[in-house]
Image: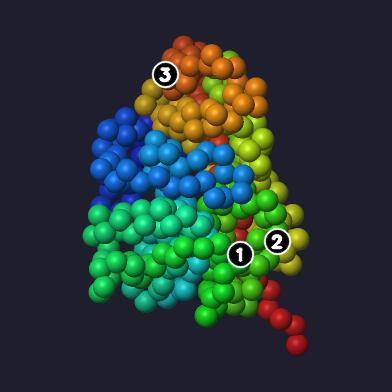
């Protein structure tokens, strides 16, 4: 099911306290809630993750997380995440998805976010503290009001051993960066209980375009897809999720797609695309996908002006969600 929604060029920030704050990307970058004064660098350890972990890229990930938060939350509701569940968040990064899940599982639930980067895990803990989500020890285990407990650990979830099974395994934009998504998912499914939920959201860059056609926007969209692909990622993995689940012994998943589309000047689409392309610039130039003289500075504004001149709309990369339940063992 596809759902196209204009966000009036703004995004809703979903905090565990259910406080909602609306602001633009420009204001967000100026605030730099998590990157300012921390000066944390996160190494690029994920297979095929060509976007890197520079402070500016982390700003983009935060902003992207808030733009997509309402869709991810509804996706998890549709998938069956509910109070009291024990959930594994794969490739949790700085905790965007983990905090959404924590709200859904409630005070009796538990969320374990796992990421390969120690710096990313520390950033997630710092973010939790700044959001006032503290546990009794004040560090790794956090709880807040109606939100469930959250713990962050360093490691590769496909290779880790867990003492207890999970009721759900979730992730967003993570399988697309694995060299063998099916092998990774199969390994993780060992720690999912029978009838447990498997719910992942992955990208479909084929939706990223302007209408009517806009040369600047459409070229940037092409750079995004080709840059991701040449770095080893799968930019259309969202469309492969049915086959992926079947390859892992799961039933055909229920699926939905959410796409942000807008013709408004302050749409977040322009900044999100421009910043993603900027993060990929070294790969784009090295692979000769984009010429060396390409000016990344001001790209968002150039796209915005061109689309506006045609009274058109711009669409972001699609967020394809797929969820299923692990089959019960036959007697």
Label 2: few (<14), some (14–19) or many (≥20) C-alpha neighbours in 10 Å = some
313 in relation to 168, above or below: above
Q: Is the Cβ of the residue at disc 1 closer than 8 Å to that at disc 2?
A: yes
| Picture coordinates of residue 9, whole percent (x, y) | 37, 31
Residue drawn at the location 32% of the way across and 34% of the way down? 29
Quarter-of-image position of residue 268 = top left
Judge whether residue 115 can be spotted in this image: yes
172 in relation to 217, above or below: below
Cα distance, mark 1 to mark 2? 8 Å
Label 1: few (<14), some (14–19) or many (≥20) C-alpha neighbours in 10 Å = some
Q: Is the Cβ of the residue at disc 2 closer than 8 Å to that at disc 3?
A: no
* Residue 183 marker: 2
Cα distance, mark 2 to mark 3? 41 Å
Indicate the secondary structure of the residue bearing disc 3: loop
* Residue 298 marker: 3
Cα distance, mark 3 to mark 1? 40 Å
Dot 3 or dot 1: first in sequence order is 1
Residue drawn at the location 57% of the way across and 69% of the way down? 160
Indicate the secondary structure of the residue bearing disc 2: helix
Label 3: few (<14), some (14–19) or many (≥20) C-alpha neighbours in 10 Å = few
| Picture coordinates of residue 165, whole percent (x, y) | 55, 78
| Picture coordinates of residue 308, whole percent (x, y) | 45, 16
């Amino acid at each position: 099911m596809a759902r196209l929604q204009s966000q009036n060029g703004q995004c809703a920030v979903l905090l565990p306290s259910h406080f909602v704050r609306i602001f633009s990307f420009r204001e967000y970058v100026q605030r730099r809630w998590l990157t300012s004064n921390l000066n944390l660098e996160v190494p690029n350890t994920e297979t095929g993750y060509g976007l890197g972990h520079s402070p500016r890229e982390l700003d983009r990930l935060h902003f992207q997380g808030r733009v997509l938060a309402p869709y991810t939350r509804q996706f998890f509701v549709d998938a069956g995440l509910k109070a009291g569940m024990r959930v594994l968040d794969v490739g949790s990064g700085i905790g965007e998805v983990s905090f959404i899940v924590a709200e859904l599982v409630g005070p009796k639930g538990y969320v374990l976010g796992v990421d390969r980067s120690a710096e990313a895990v520390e950033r997630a803990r710092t973010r939790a503290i700044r959001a006032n989500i503290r546990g009794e020890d004040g560090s790794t285990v956090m709880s807040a009001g109606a939100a469930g407990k959250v713990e962050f650990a360093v490691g590769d979830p496909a290779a880790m051993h867990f003492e207890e099974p999970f009721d759900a395994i979730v992730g967003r934009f993570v399988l697309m960066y694995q060299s063998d998504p099916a092998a990774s998912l199969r390994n993780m499914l060992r720690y999912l209980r029978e009838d447990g939920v498997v719910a992942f959201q992955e990208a479909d860059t084929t939706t990223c375009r302007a209408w009517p056609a806009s040369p600047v926007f459409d070229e940037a969209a092409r750079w995004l897809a080709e840059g991701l692909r040449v770095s080893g990622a799968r930019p259309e993995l969202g469309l492969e999720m049915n086959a992926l689940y079947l390859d892992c012994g799961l039933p055909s998943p229920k699926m939905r797609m959410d796409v942000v589309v807008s013709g408004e000047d302050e749409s977040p689409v322009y900044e999100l695309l421009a910043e993603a392309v900027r993060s990929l610039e070294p790969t784009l130039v090295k692979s000769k996908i984009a010429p060396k003289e390409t000016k990344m500075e001001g790209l968002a504004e150039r796209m915005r002006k061109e689309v506006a001149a045609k009274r058109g709309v711009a669409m972001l990369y699609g967020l394809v969600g797929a969820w299923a339940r692990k089959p019960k063992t036959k007697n």
